[in-house]
C-alpha cells in the first residue's frame, strides 16, 4: 500500500542542513498495524506527517497505492489524502466552536457528501463509539478519553484505508489508553491499515510490526 | 457547506461578545456615514433621467480667460448663439434657450416670489416634461405665455383651473397661463418653477423692461443653450461649428491682455456632477464635492475595517488551530478562505442594520440638516440593492486580509506549536494600524476644533457696523416708502434705512470707478442706500456727511459715499481730501463724494476690507433696515410684522433679526455639526480598536502577569508594563498628527481674511484629550488584570 524509498528530510539550522529523516525505506502492506517507536526528537512525527501528506520530503520517492505522491500537485495530493487517510493527534485537536456531531462531520463537508448521507454516516459512527448522548456537547464538556474518541471518530468518518495516529494515548490514563488500543485492534481486524506513533511498549504490542527510529533513521537492530 | 460556514460564523460572533461588539459597532458607525454618502450620490445621479433623447442632447458652455490669464468655465452662453448656429450650420435639429428671471409674481390677492425662465418653443420636444393641461406644441410659442409647475399653479390658484388665468410679473407685465406641468417623472437640474415664451423677450427689450440681451454677444452669463443634434450629425461637427463661431467673434472683438473666450460642447448626460462652473444653472452637484464625500466615507470605513482586520489577526493564533484541523480534515486553502470571508460578511450585516439606525437617529437633528433630509431615508429597491452591494464590499474589505493570512497556515506547524507560527500580518502591522487610526482621529480633531473656533470667532467678531437690535425686511420698491414711514412711527424704532443688499453678507454688485474719464477703471463693490443707512447701522464717518437731501424731481445719481479702503486706488491721500471730489462710476455717470466711511466688513468676516461705494438711487432698494432700541425683546418682530401686514396683506413677512442671521451664517452650524459628527465617529472607531487590542493583549498575557505577581511585582509595575507599548503608539500618532493637523489648519485658515491663529492650546487640547480617552480605555482593562488574584489565572491554565 505504501512505499517509501530513500526518503530524507532536512531543515537549515543556522545555515547548516540538519537531517530530521535520513534515507528512510519503508513498505507497508494493506492490513498492517504498525507502531513507530523511538526516543523523543527521533523524527517519528515528521515521518508520520510525510506519510500523511501533510508535509513534503526533501528527497526520495513515495508511492501510495502505486501512485507517485512525490510528483503530485497540491490539489491532487489533497484529493488522494481526503479519501484515503485519517489522522489522530495526541492533543485531540477538536474545534472548540463545534459540537461533537459537527466535529465528526467536518471531513465529510470537504468531500462534498450530501447532507442526508452525512447524517447517516455520522449517526452510524456515533452509535458505534457509543457517544450518541454526547453529540450536542462541545469538546470542552468532555473528558480527555471522550475527546480522543471523537477525534478517532472524525478520522474514521470518511472510511479511510489508512489511519495515522501520533501518540493517540499520550494524554490519557492507562485505562483510557487501553480502550483506545482495543478499538484500534478492532479496526485493524476490520481492514483498516494503522500506523501509530507511541512511546509505550505495551501499546506497541497491539501492532503487528514495530519500527524503531533513531536520529531520523530506521534502526534495524 | 455554506450553511455550515454561516453557522460557525454566527456561533463565533455570539461567543466573542466583546470582539463582536467592537467590530459591529465600529463598522456600523462607519456604515452610517457611507449610507449617507450613498443616498446623497444616488440622489444626485438620479437627476435628468427622464428626457426623451439624452444621447443627442448637448449644452453649449463658455470658456473664458480674463485679462490676468485666469480661466473660468461658464455654464452660460450669449443669447444670439443659437441663431448663428442654426442659420450658418446644418447640425441642430432643435434648441431651447433657458433665460432665468427672478422676481415677484402677482395674481389676484396673491403675491409670491417666483423663479421662472424664458424658454424656446421646443421646450417640450427636448425635455421630458409633460403638460397636465395645455398644448405642448403651442404653449410656449406666442408672446406673454407662461407655463406653471404643478406646485406653483396650486399656490396661485388652489384647486381651480389655472389655464387662461393672468399672472403679472413685477416689471415684466402680464402673462397668460397656457399650460400646467405634470409632476416631472424625476429630478432635473432645470428646477425653474415656471417657463415663459422666449418670444416675449424681444417685446420686453423693446419696451425697456429687460436689458437688451437678445442680440448681445457680450453678455455671456444670462442664458443657457440646450440643443438636440440632428440624427446624422455628431458631437465633433457641433464642436467645430461652435469653435468656428467663437473664433469669428474673437477676431471682431476688442479684447485686451490675455482675454479670450470660446464655446465648448457639453454632452447633456455629463451635466450632472460635472466640474464646478460659474453661473451654473440649478443643482448639478459638484464632482469635486462628491469625490471628497466618497473619499471621507471610504477612509472612515477603512478605519473601521482596520479594527476588524486587527482583531481577527490578533485572534488568529486561536483560530489557527481550527485552520489546521480543517486542513487535516481535507479542506483546501480556498475553502478556508471562503469560510473566513463569510464570517466577515456575516459581521457586516448587523453592522449595516446598526448603521441604518444611526443614520435615522442623526437625520433630523439640527447639525445634520445640510447632510440629508428625512425624506431621503425611505429606501427604494435600487437603494437597497446599493446597500447590499456596499455591505458585501465592506465585508470583503474587512475580511480579505485576515482570511488570506489565516488560510495560509500550514497545518503541521500550527498543530505542533502555535506560538512558533509566523504571522503574515505581524505585530508591527497591527501596531501600524493603530497608529494610523489615531493619527487620523487626531488630525480630524485638530481640524474640527480649528474650524469651530474660526467660525465662532467670526460669529462674534465686530464687523465694524451695528448688527444687534437690527431688523432686516426684504421689500420691493412698491409701497416701500409707505412702509418705511409706518415703521418710523413705531415706538421703539430708532431709525429706518433702505438698502439694496444686506451688508455683512455680500455687496449688491461690482462697478467700475474712475478718478477722471479715460483713467484706468477701479473695480469696487457697491450698495444702493439712502441717507439714513449711516445712522441706522452706526457707520462712522471719517469726513464729510451722509447723502444730502435731494429734490424728489432729481432721480439721477448725484452723490456717493466711499469707504476708506477706496481712497488709495483712487490716489486720494486723506478722507478730507476726498470730500467734494468728482468721480465717474458705471463708466460714465458723474458723481460727487459726499463722505468717507470708516472701513467695515461688508462682505462678512471671510473677506478683507474691499473698496466700496455707497450709491444713492431711489427705486433700487430691496431691504429696509430697522434699528430698534436695545431694551426691546425679540418678540418686537411681531409688532413690525403687523405693520407689514397693513401694507402687504397678501405677502409673507420675511423680517429677521440681523444678529441671528449673522450668527447662523458665520457659525456654520451645519458644517461644524457634520465635522463634529465625523470626528466623533473617527475617534470612537480608533478607541474601539484600541480597546480590542488591549483586551486581546491582556488576555494573552494573563498567565505571564500571574507569574510576575507571584514573584512579587506590584500592581503599579504591571500596569506600567502593560500600558507602555500602547502609550508609545499614541505618542507616535501624536508626533505625526500634530504637525499635519497644524499645517492643515494653517492652510485652511489662510482662506479667511480675519482669522484666529492655531493656538498651541488646540494642539494640546486635542492631544491630551486623545491621550485621556485612550488612557482610560487602557487602564480600565489593564487594572482588572493587574489586580486579579494570580492564583486564578495560573490555575485555569
Ligand atoms: N521546523 C523545524 N526546524 C528545526 N527543527 C525541527 C523542525 N521540526 C522538527 N524539528 C526537529 O526535528 C526533530 C524531529 O522532530 P519530531 O517532531 O519528528 O520528533 P518526534 O520523534 O515526534 O519527538 P516526540 O517524541 O517528542 O514527539 C526534533 O529534533 C525537532 O527538534
Ligand atoms: Mg512527535
Image (cartoon, rainbow, N blue to C red):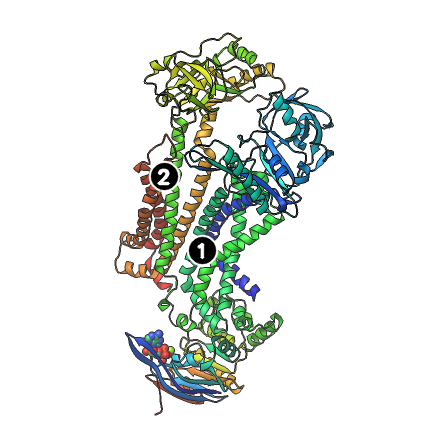
Residue nearest the viewer, comparing B394 with A165: B394
The answer to the question of whether label 1 and label 2 lie on touching residues, with beta carbons closer than 8 A, is: no
Tell me the tag on residue B308: 1
Quadrant of the image containing the N terminus of chain B: bottom right
Q: Quadrant of residue B53?
A: top right
Residue nearest the viewer, comparing B196 with A75: B196
Residue nearest the viewer, comparing B544 with B794: B544
Mark 2 or mark 1, which is nearer the start of the sequence?
A: 1
The lab-note entry on whether marks 1 and 2 share a chain reads yes
Label 2 lies in what chain? B
A41 on left or right of B324: left
Quadrant of the image containing the C terminus of chain B: bottom left
Q: Position of residue B58 (x, y in %)?
A: 60, 42
Tell me the tag on residue B54: none
B738 on left or right of B288: left
Residue at the farthest bottom position: A221
Residue B415 in view: yes
Judged from the image, the secondary structure of the residue bearing numbered disc 1 is helix
Residue at the farthest top position: B551
Amino acid at each position: 500500500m505504501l512505499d517509501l524509498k530513500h526518503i530524507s528530510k532536512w531543515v537549515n539550522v543556522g545555515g547548516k542542513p540538519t537531517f530530521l529523516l535520513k534515507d528512510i525505506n519503508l513498505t507497508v502492506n494493506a492490513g498492517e498495524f504498525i507502531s513507530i517507536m523511538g526516543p523523543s526528537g527521533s523524527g517519528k512525527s515528521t515521518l508520520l506527517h510525510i506519510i500523511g501528506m501533510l508535509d513534503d520530503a526533501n528527497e526520495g520517492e513515495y508511492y501510495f497505492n502505486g501512485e507517485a505522491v512525490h510528483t503530485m500537485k497540491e490539489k491532487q495530493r489533497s484529493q488522494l489524502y481526503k479519501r484515503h487517510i485519517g489522522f489522530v493527534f495526541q492533543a485531540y485537536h477538536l474545534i472548540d466552536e463545534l459540537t461533537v456531531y459537527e466535529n465528526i462531520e467536518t471531513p465529510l463537508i470537504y468531500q462534498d457528501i450530501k447532507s442526508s448521507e452525512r447524517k447517516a454516516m455520522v449517526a452510524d459512527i456515533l452509535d458505534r463509539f457509543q457517544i450518541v448522548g454526547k453529540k450536542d456537547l462541545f469538546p470542552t464538556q468532555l473528558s480527555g478519553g471522550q475527546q480522543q474518541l471523537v477525534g478517532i471518530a472524525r478520522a474514521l468518518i470518511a472510511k479511510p484505508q489508512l489511519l495515522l495516529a501520533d501518540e493517540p494515548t499520550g494524554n490519557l490514563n492507562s485505562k483510557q489508553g487501553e480502550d483506545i488500543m482495543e478499538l484500534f485492534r478492532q479496526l485493524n481486524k476490520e481492514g483498516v491499515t494503522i500506523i501509530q506513533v507511541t512511546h509505550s511498549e505495551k501499546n506497541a504490542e497491539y501492532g503487528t510490526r514495530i519500527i524503531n527510529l533513531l536520529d531520523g533513521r530506521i534502526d534495524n537492530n | 457547506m455554506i450553511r455550515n460556514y454561516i453557522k460557525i460564523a454566527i456561533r463565533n460572533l455570539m461567543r466573542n461578545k466583546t470582539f463582536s461588539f467592537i467590530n459591529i459597532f465600529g463598522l456600523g458607525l462607519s456604515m452610517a456615514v457611507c449610507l449617507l454618502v450613498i443616498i446623497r450620490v444616488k440622489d444626485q445621479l438620479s437627476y435628468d433621467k427622464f428626457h426623451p433623447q439624452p444621447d443627442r442632447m448637448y449644452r453649449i458652455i463658455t470658456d473664458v480667460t480674463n485679462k490676468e490669464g485666469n480661466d473660468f468655465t461658464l455654464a452660460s452662453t450669449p443669447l444670439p448663439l443659437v441663431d448663428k448656429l442654426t442659420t450658418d450650420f446644418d447640425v441642430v435639429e432643435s434648441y431651447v434657450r433657458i433665460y432665468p428671471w427672478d422676481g415677484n409674481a402677482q395674481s389676484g390677492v396673491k403675491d409670491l416670489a417666483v423663479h421662472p425662465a424664458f424658454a424656446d418653443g421646443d421646450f417640450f420636444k427636448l425635455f421630458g416634461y409633460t403638460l397636465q393641461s395645455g398644448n405642448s406644441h403651442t404653449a410656449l410659442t406666442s408672446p406673454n405665455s407662461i407655463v406653471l409647475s404643478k406646485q406653483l399653479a396650486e399656490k396661485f390658484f388652489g384647486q381651480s383651473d389655472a389655464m387662461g388665468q393672468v399672472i403679472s410679473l413685477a416689471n415684466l407685465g402680464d402673462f397668460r397661463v397656457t399650460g400646467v406641468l405634470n409632476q416631472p417623472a424625476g429630478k432635473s437640474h432645470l428646477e425653474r418653477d415656471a417657463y415663459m415664451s422666449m418670444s416675449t423677450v424681444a417685446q420686453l427689450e423693446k419696451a425697456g423692461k429687460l436689458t437688451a440681451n437678445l442680440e448681445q454677444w457680450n453678455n455671456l452669463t444670462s442664458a443657457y443653450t440646450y440643443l438636440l443634434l440632428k440624427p446624422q450629425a455628431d458631437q465633433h461637427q457641433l464642436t467645430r461649428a461652435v469653435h468656428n463661431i467663437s473664433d469669428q467673434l474673437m477676431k471682431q472683438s476688442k479684447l485686451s491682455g490675455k482675454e479670450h473666450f470660446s464655446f465648448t460642447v457639453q454632452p447633456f448626460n455629463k451635466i450632472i456632477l460635472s466640474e464646478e462652473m460659474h453661473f451654473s444653472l440649478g443643482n448639478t452637484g459638484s464632482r469635486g464635492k462628491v469625490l471628497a464625500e466618497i473619499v471621507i466615507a471610504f477612509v472612515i470605513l477603512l478605519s473601521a475595517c482596520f479594527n476588524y482586520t486587527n482583531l481577527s489577526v490578533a485572534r488568529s493564533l486561536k483560530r489557527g488551530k481550527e485552520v489546521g484541523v480543517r486542513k487535516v480534515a481535507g479542506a483546501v486553502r480556498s475553502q478556508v478562505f471562503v469560510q473566513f470571508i463569510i464570517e466577515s460578511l456575516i459581521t457586516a450585516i448587523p453592522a449595516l442594520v446598526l448603521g441604518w439606525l444611526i443614520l435615522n437617529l442623526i437625520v433630523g437633528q439640527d447639525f445634520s440638516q445640510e447632510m440629508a433630509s428625512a425624506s431621503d431615508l425611505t429606501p427604494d429597491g435600487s437603494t437597497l440593492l446599493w446597500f447590499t452591494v456596499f455591505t458585501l464590499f465592506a465585508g470583503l474589505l474587512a475580511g480579505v486580509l485576515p482570511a488570506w493570512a489565516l488560510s495560509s497556515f500550514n497545518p503541521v506547524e500550527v498543530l505542533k506549536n502555535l506560538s512558533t507560527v509566523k504571522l503574515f500580518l505581524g505585530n508591527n502591522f497591527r501596531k501600524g494600524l493603530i497608529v494610523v487610526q489615531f493619527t487620523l482621529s487626531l488630525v480630524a480633531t485638530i481640524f474640527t476644533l480649528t474650524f469651530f473656533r474660526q467660525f465662532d470667532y467670526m460669529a462674534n467678531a465686530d464687523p465694524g457696523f451695528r448688527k444687534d437690535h437690527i431688523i432686516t425686511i426684504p421689500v420691493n420698491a412698491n409701497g416701500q416708502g409707505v412702509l418705511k414711514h409706518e415703521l418710523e412711527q413705531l415706538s421703539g424704532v430708532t431709525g429706518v434705512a433702505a438698502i439694496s443688499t444686506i451688508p455683512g453678507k455680500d455687496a449688491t454688485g461690482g462697478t467700475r470707478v474712475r478718478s477722471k474719464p479715460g483713467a484706468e477703471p477701479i473695480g469696487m463693490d457697491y450698495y444702493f442706500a439712502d441717507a439714513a443707512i449711516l445712522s441706522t447701522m452706526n457707520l462712522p464717518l471719517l469726513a464729510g456727511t451722509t447723502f444730502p437731501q435731494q429734490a424728489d424731481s432729481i432721480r439721477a445719481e448725484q452723490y456717493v459715499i466711499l469707504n476708506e479702503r477706496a481712497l488709495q486706488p483712487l490716489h486720494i491721500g486723506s478722507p478730507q481730501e476726498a470730500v467734494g471730489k468728482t468721480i465717474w462710476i458705471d463708466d460714465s455717470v458723474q458723481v460727487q463724494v459726499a463722505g468717507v466711511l470708516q472701513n467695515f466688513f461688508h462682505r462678512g468676516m471671510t473677506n478683507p476690507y474691499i473698496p466700496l461705494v455707497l450709491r444713492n438711487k431711489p427705486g433700487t432698494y430691496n431691504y429696509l433696515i430697522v434699528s430698534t432700541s436695545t431694551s426691546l425683546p425679540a418678540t418686537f418682530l411681531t409688532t413690525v410684522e403687523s405693520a407689514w401686514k397693513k401694507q402687504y396683506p397678501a405677502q409673507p413677512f420675511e423680517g429677521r433679526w440681523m444678529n441671528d442671521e449673522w450668527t447662523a451664517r458665520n457659525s456654520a452650524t451645519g458644517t461644524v455639526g457634520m465635522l463634529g459628527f465625523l470626528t466623533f465617529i473617527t475617534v470612537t472607531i480608533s478607541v474601539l480598536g484600541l480597546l480590542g487590542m488591549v483586551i486581546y493583549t491582556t488576555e494573552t498575557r494573563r498567565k505571564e502577569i500571574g507569574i510576575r505577581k507571584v514573584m512579587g511585582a506590584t500592581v503599579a509595575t504591571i500596569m506600567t508594563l502593560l500600558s507602555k507599548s500602547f502609550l508609545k503608539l499614541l505618542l507616535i500618532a501624536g508626533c505625526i498628527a500634530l504637525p499635519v493637523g497644524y499645517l492643515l489648519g494653517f492652510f485652511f485658515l489662510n482662506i479667511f481674511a480675519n482669522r484666529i491663529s492655531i493656538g498651541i492650546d488646540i494642539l494640546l487640547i486635542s492631544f491630551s484629550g486623545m491621550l485621556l480617552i485612550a488612557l482610560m480605555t487602557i487602564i480600565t482593562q489593564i487594572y482588572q488584570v493587574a489586580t486579579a488574584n494570580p492564583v486564578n489565572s495560573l490555575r485555569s491554565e
